Image (cartoon, grey):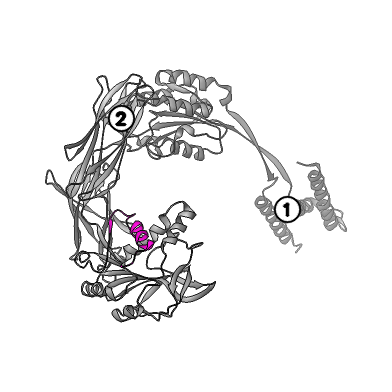
Amino acid sequence: MQIQTVLLIILAAVVALSIVLFQYYKDVKKRGRTGWLLSFLRFCSFFGLLLLIINPKMVKNEYSTRKTDLVVLTDNSSSVQKYRAQLENLLSQIESFNGLNDRFSIHQYGFDKSLNNLDSLTYEGDGTDINRAISEIEQLHSDSKVVTLLLTDGNQTSGQDYGFFKARNNFAINTIAVGDTTHYDDLAISQVNANRFAFLNNKFPIEIFADYTGSSEVNTQLTIQVNGRQVFRQSISFNRTKRSEAINTLIDARSVGLKNIKVSLTTLPNEKFVENNTREVGVEVIDEKTQIAIVSNWEHPDIGTLKKAIESNEQRSVSIYKTSDVGNWQEADLFILYQPDASYKPVYDLLQKNQSSVFTVTGSQTDWNFLNSIQNSFSKEGYDQTEDISPILNQGFSLFDLGDFSVEDYPPLRSTLGEIQIIANSQNVLTQSIKGVELDEPLLTVFENNQQRQAVLFGEDLWKWRMASFKRNQSFEDFDQLISKIILYLASNGARERLTLDYPSVFDGSNEARIYASYFDNAFIFNRNANIVLKVTNSASNTSVEIPFLLKDSNYEADLSNLSPGQYKFSVSVEGENLSKSGQFSILEFDIEKQFAATDYQKLSRLAMQNSGNLYFTDQVPKLLEELESNPQYVPTQTSNQNIVSLIDFRILLALIALTLAAEWFIRKYIGLI
């Protein structure tokens, strides 16, 4: 307590005593015992009031012992299932070691793809993310000194590479390598890349990465089987310096349907771990290319530009015809008419008959008298004078997503002057600007008229835009995406469906297998209260199971993780509605956790060395525990916290003041002084 506070308390006592003496003994010299009692009560009242005003404080010291946090982080993935006894023995050693509890505050966790409690260890996790686990531990214990014991085989299947993890100061990581640390000669298919879809009677690419671990020179055979039939074979050699090879090949898509592609390496004579010598992927062969006909009697760079942009999507095929090729373009799904004139009348007759979608590109060679008379969706009073027209992007366009498309620095297109009238209900993608003056005229517009979707570009030299896109981004992707989205809008002219499904045809293992559904009511408003049921039938055993769809966010989801690998057919139905959909999918037999032959102790050593720790093998754990128990860096520290508190609780003081005042009043009342 400060000397100033002590002096104020003494002064308060003197003032209170002076007031009492003045009030009780100014005129009466003696009151007896009752007078002394009343004087004492009044003194207590005044002194208590003055103490409330002074509010004296004192410093209170609180002492606590702070231990270092010892975090035991155990791998819970299926890759350590075979080392379960070894892990449980290590955990038992740590828990029973005398002295650790005196020095450390022990925290135990497990992890696979995420962090979890140690009491839930099952060694069945379908993935391993070591980097995420130690990052979350660092966040959970951010305000204390931490020593982490990481028990794992070091084989990570997802997330950032933990070998480059660097923790903050006062966060040490000691790694304990679990499992077989002996390195054997081993071959592996590390990755197979293939498209999800291929088109009938085409070739589809497959890219394979084969790896070798070992020091001797070995030879192996790479084979590819499609639905059990071998379609490719190649010899590969590896040695001490050549440890990997990429193989690229093309496979014929000869029939429609799901194709199970199995890539294998023949095993070495002394190879111990052979599960990673095989990898399977699935490709669905379809015969659903959108056939697009570009009809033009003019030779122009725009024709090739449109063909290149559209065919950047492999599901679309473009053919170029003249108006005289009547028999060739009759089966097209979508038409692009380039600068129509009177010779295009047979094309317009077919469009009228089939209600096919059409993309019209006009320019300096367009016959506007013919075009205005042959259709009733738009018109233009064309003049012979040409003009350069710059594009302006309509930020309010909403019929489909334009993404990050921008026309900034795009050169102008060439067109004829004239007033444009759009008769159908339309939205402008681009509007016109001439010599810096913005016009309320469309440059690129899309609309729907009597179930027929159309798009019109009022300008030529579209090839300049594709060149400008490449100049800006070193890629044609932005321009090609715009054309692709326009084609997709025009090709999607069917009736809107109330029940839609989203799923791949092939799942790489059942862990992430999901089918998503969206269901709309008669007003096409998403229905969140529907009962949707998935019936799945195994094609081989013909056994069926029903799985309910569960509402998740803005769609429904069916979990297929309990299904075994194989071929399946399914149907989806909505209870109380005459709505159903069917399809098929394949689940491949693949477990990424089984693709590792040995413990990656080298990366574990790098992680420990970067974070003030060391690598230990399982027989060295007693040594590690002894080092932790004797290391002076981890001696518990005593800390002192100084808290400034009131000398007297104001509630107690108020109660005493009230009590003394009341006692004085009652005594004075009793003896008749009031």
Q: Residue shown at 21%/42% (left/top)?
A: 260
The residue mark sitting in front, 2 or 1, is 2
Q: Does the magenta stretch include residue 431?
A: no
Circle 2 residues within 10 Å: few <14, some 14–19, many ≥20: many
Magenta segment range? 297-318
Type of amino acid at the residue the image marks with label 2: Ala
Tell me residue 54's x, y (percent): 76, 51
The residue lying toward the viewer, choosing from 572 and 595, is 595
The residue lying toward the viewer, choosing from 124 and 439, is 439
Question: Mark 1 — residue?
Answer: 52
Q: Is residue 341 above or below residue 596?
A: below
- Secondary structure under tag 2 reads strand
Q: Work out which quarter of the rendered image holds the C terminus and state it.
A: bottom right
- Secondary structure under tag 1 reads helix
Chain-order first, disc 2 or disc 1: 1
Q: Is residue 378 above or below residue 406?
A: below
Between marks 2 and 1, how big is the CA–CA gap?
Answer: 82 Å
The residue lying toward the viewer, choosing from 114 and 352, is 352
Tell me residue 621's x, y (percent): 43, 20
